[in-house]
Image (cartoon, rainbow, N blue to C red):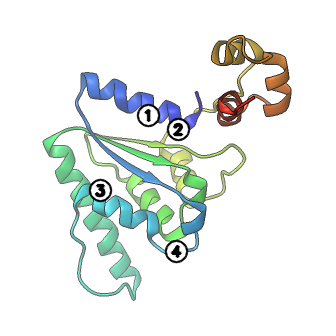
Amino acid sequence: IGKTALAEALAEELADTAAPRVVRVTGRAAEASLAYAAATDLVRGIGASLPEGTIRTPGDLQRVHEAVRAALERLAAEAPVLLIVDVAEQIDRPSAVLLGYLAHRLPEGILMLVCWRPGTTGGALQHAVRDVGEILTLAPLDAPHIAELVGESLDAEDVLRRTRGIPLLVHELAAAPT
């Protein structure tokens, strides 16, 4: 019903038709200050090996970014890849720069889906998506859609008032004990 659920539904739908490899990277508030936290998840998820040594110069950084892109390209040569980047607004800046680099140079056979909370569009990754991708904005749920989700157990208008139609909040309210 929200961005994360939509991403998961896409992964399931594609699994039934195109059998892609799904790679997930998720931003976490607790890791937003840890450089390369999300990038580490990506590298592990695609089984990449990176150049040895520390990153001291822009050239070193370029080689690391290119090694990750090349690993994705090799993976996509075997089967289509769906790269889901969720909660992008909480991804650490160095990882967001890497993911933005990949978005600008996405190898053939890879679909990159980046999800972020509305109003958080200032990051490096979001700028890259605006440059090369398509942005879809999910509207809040309205009362009829809320009624479909909560059934008759809750008043849809009250849920709308309390949650402003934010899918995650609607789901949490519907699941809460009464």
- Write down the quadrant of residue 31 in the picture: bottom right
Residue position for label 2: 4
Question: What amino acid is at disc 4?
Answer: Leu
Q: Distance between the residues labelled 4 and 3?
A: 18 Å
Question: What amino acid is at disc 1?
Answer: Glu
Question: What amino acid is at disc 2?
Answer: Thr
Query: Measuring 67% from the left and 18% from the top, which residue is drawn there?
Result: 150
Q: Residue furthest front?
A: 178
The kind of secondary structure element at disc 3 is helix
Residue sitting nearer the eye, 105 or 8: 8
Q: Distance between the residues labelled 1 and 3?
A: 17 Å
Residue position for label 3: 45
In primary-sequence order, the first of circles 1 and 3 is 1
Compared with 128, 157 (above or below) is: above
Residue position for label 1: 8
In primary-sequence order, the first of circles 4 and 3 is 4
